[in-house]
């Protein structure tokens, strides 16, 4: 009588089980799940690299073999979750990630609910209005309305930017909960993006205290030469910022004094956003 080889599942050794065996199918499924986790980890790492990163850099940061990293990046690139820049041999988050993020934003009400308010601020100021949230050690642009002028602000939805060089970022840090604020103030990497960027820890600490004292944050060519901005926090019921709202202008079009004069307009809009947006 022949034995049906399919009556018992094939077994493989379980390294963590003291020599116990597990079905080969289960082992394959766990291996695939592990690879999915590694791929998602690479996307998270790329999210912390607005300028992109090479496969070697990602491999080191992820603590994965280069061959594994390269294979996963290839799969993610093929499916649109990662973009590859041949000239610089660098990888960036792809359009699929942005599309998913936009769906999440719409689901939580940020994009649709905030847009009419942002448009009203832009109509009154004549300049670009930007809504951002904190994403780890960066700010993430959730929505933006350009002004009628021909000179555009380049911080489009989905953009990741520095916290220490932007008005929206400073507002998010200054009005975070106490523990988060202290950690960010002491541990943020103060990388210079222009010669006017704050890179001294004491200076950054003093800047955040100033933002808390006056209730708004400014950026004067610290993030991008030729641009300045003012931002206010969007506060939850505990008084902590879950978003920030800014007006950004080219330096030739508006002085810092004129820009700060828009703070009451931004604060009124921020209060309306606080009441309408889902708080985090």
Image (cartoon, rainbow, N blue to C red):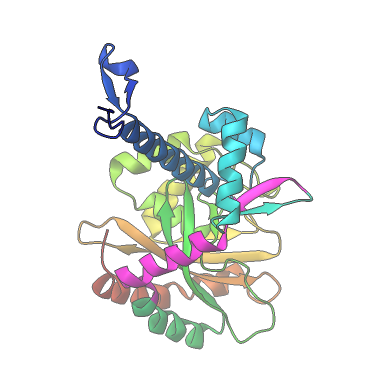
Residue at the image position 55 percent from the left and 57 percent from the top: 79
Q: How many labels does the image show?
A: 0
- Provide the major secondary structure of the magenta segment: helix
Left of 15 or right of it: where is 207?
right
Camera-nearest residue between 273 and 17: 17
Residue at the image position 51 percent from the left and 42 percent from the top: 42
Camera-nearest residue between 38 and 87: 38
Instruction: Tell me the quarter of the image containing the N terminus.
Output: top left
Camera-nearest residue between 124 and 244: 244
Residue at the image position 70 percent from the left and 59 percent from the top: 225
Residue at far top of view: 18
Dividing the picture into quadrants, the one containing residue 238 is bottom left
Dividing the picture into quadrants, the one containing residue 37 is top left
Instruction: Tell me the quarter of the image containing the C terminus.
Output: bottom left
Examine the structure image and report whether residue 17 is included in the region drawn in magenta: no
**Residue 89 can be seen in this image:** yes
Left of 240 or right of it: where is 221?
right
Left of 265 or right of it: where is 81?
right
Left of 108 or right of it: where is 172?
right
Examine the structure image and report whether residue 100 is included in the region drawn in magenta: yes
Dividing the picture into quadrants, the one containing residue 222 is bottom right
Residue at far left of view: 237
Residue at far front of view: 1
- Percent x, y of residue 251: 68, 69
- Percent x, y of residue 36: 43, 43
Give the magenta part as a residue range: 88-111
- Percent x, y of residue 269: 36, 77
- Percent x, y of residue 165: 57, 51
**Residue 51 can be seen in this image:** no
């Amino acid at each position: 009588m022949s034995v049906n080889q399919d009556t018992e599942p094939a077994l493989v050794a379980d390294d963590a089980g003291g020599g116990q065996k597990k079905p080969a199918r289960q082992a394959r499924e766990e291996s695939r799940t592990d690879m999915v986790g590694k791929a998602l980890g690479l996307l998270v790492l790329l999210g912390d690299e607005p300028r992109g990163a090479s496969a070697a850099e990602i491999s080191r940061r992820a603590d994965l073999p280069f061959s594994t990293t390269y294979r996963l990046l290839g799969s993610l690139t093929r499916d649109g979750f990662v973009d590859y820049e041949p000239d610089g041999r660098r990888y960036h988050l792809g359009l699929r990630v942005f599309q998913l993020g936009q769906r999440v934003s719409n689901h939580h009400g940020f994009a649709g609910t905030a847009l009419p308010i942002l448009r009203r601020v832009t109509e009154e100021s004549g300049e670009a209005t930007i809504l951002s949230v904190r994403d780890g050690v960066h700010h993430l642009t959730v929505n933006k309305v350009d002004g009628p002028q021909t000179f555009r602000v380049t911080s489009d939805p989905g953009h990741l930017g520095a916290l220490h060089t932007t008005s929206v970022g400073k507002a998010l840090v200054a009005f975070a909960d106490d523990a988060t604020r202290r950690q960010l103030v002491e541990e943020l990497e103060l990388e210079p993006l222009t010669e006017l960027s704050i890179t001294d820890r004491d200076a950054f600490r003093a800047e955040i205290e100033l933002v808390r004292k006056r209730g708004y944050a400014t950026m004067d060519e610290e993030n991008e030469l030729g641009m300045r901005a003012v931002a206010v926090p969007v506060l939850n019921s505990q008084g902590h910022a879950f978003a920030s709202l800014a007006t950004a202008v080219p330096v030739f079009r508006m002085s810092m004094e004129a820009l700060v004069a828009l703070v009451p307009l931004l604060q009124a809009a921020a209060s309306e956003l606080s009441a309408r947006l889902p708080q985090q």
